[in-house]
Image (cartoon, rainbow, N blue to C red):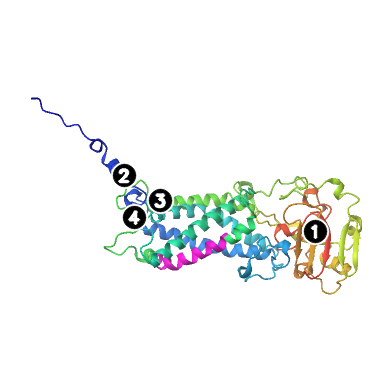
Amino acid sequence: MPERRRIPSLPDRLPDRLTALRTPADPGFWRSPVRGARFTAVLGLVLLAGLTLLFVTGLLSYAAYNPDLDPVNDKTPDKGWLGFYLFAWPTGPHWLYRLTQGLHVTVGIVLVPVLLAKLWSVIPRLFALPPARSVGHALERISLLLLVGGALFEFLTGLLNIQLDYLFPGSFYTLHFYGAWVFLAGFVAHVALKLPQAVRVLRSGIPRGEPDPLAAPDPLPATLSRRGALAMVGAGSLLLLVTSVGRSVDGPLRRIALLTPRGGTEQGPGPNAFQVNKTAAAVRIAPADTGERWRLTVRGPAGELRFSRAELLAMEQHSAALPIACVEGWSTSDQLWRGVRLSDLAALAGYPDSPPDVFVESLQRSGSFRKAALRDNQVRDGRSLLALEVNGAPLSPDHGYPARIIVPAAPGVLNTKWVETLTFGEL
């Protein structure tokens, strides 16, 4: 009788690594030899310094808008106690907002490779089971959720904003503001839990006999050392720095700032040859709106006064060398502005000795910040002007002709263009 041949079953025919299907919850699923506690600790300390700087400069940017001065300046309503730190934004040094917001945007861009590498290095922990082994472990996982979710949300909305791509629902200011506080809650909790461990690992390494908690238990053959991986992350950050910082500083780096917003088109050639965010055409300012019939309305205790551009030019003119710096991170070098001091216009309005706040309204009929409020310290500063000229020439339509506000150290959106009305008084 012939011998029967055994037919292999399906599992017998499959390779070993397919018979034991692995999920992300299995430590053996993650096999990169680069992951390790020391690698993660280095990235974590870089992020600790960088994210702290981002949070501080972000709060300063919010304060620069004087959000508690008037509702039109506050795009984050119902902030409550989250506005505890707000103060009267100073006018000096005149490059203050250019520095703080330039740091905020540039450092945020530079940290992108570090953040992605850090998330990659700890991603096995996100799938670890059971989700919570104790109350303390549950709190750690919740803080991690707030940290990772908040960081990704803040970086995504920030990068979209600086590229002028408003794809997110709602106001960027509101979303970014509250997202920052959610991120901070996770960040503080995570640092409190992990900083001592990270410092210990960097100083002494993993204690002898203890396994590396982040290393793969069954790593693949190494093709890149951990130092090499850190060098790649550093090179990526350096590349982003070189191709972005030029929009916040002067010099040849401006020509290669390919990854940061240029503030719309650069006007040129000529005295008005520096970038703008919104053109006159984009906000539907027609030549008839700014022609011979245009009048500046000034209101105060002295009543309502109206001035033509020629009458404003006949007043005492003053000059100030000031930059424009916008929340998207781009800024100009100092431009030489010339016009009438806001304090002189306040005197005409009925405040000869102590200029108060001023409420500024633009010819622009729609869009954010077509109305804005300035504090009394900004009005008092002798460099704060209703500018009529720049760099020895009349303002171009895109730079705010027939008149615009220019204030030292103020965000660009508070330097209102196409000014129609100034109302002086306590706000």
Element on which disc 1 rests: strand
Residue 57 position, x and y percent, is 60, 63
Q: Is residue 198 left or right of residue 414?
A: left
* Residue type pointed to by label 1: Glu
Q: Earlier in the sequence, mark 3 or mark 4?
A: 4
Q: Is residue 158 left or right of residue 95?
A: left
Element on which disc 3 rests: helix
Mark 3 or mark 2: which is in front? 2
Cα–Cα span, label 4 and label 1: 60 Å
Magenta region includes residue 193:
yes
Q: Quadrant of the C terminus?
A: bottom right
Mark 1 or mark 2: which is in front? 2
Residue under label 1, please give it: 361
Depth check: give the residue in front, 212 or 324. 212
Residue under label 3, please give it: 228
Residue under label 4, please give it: 215
Label annotation for residue 21: 2
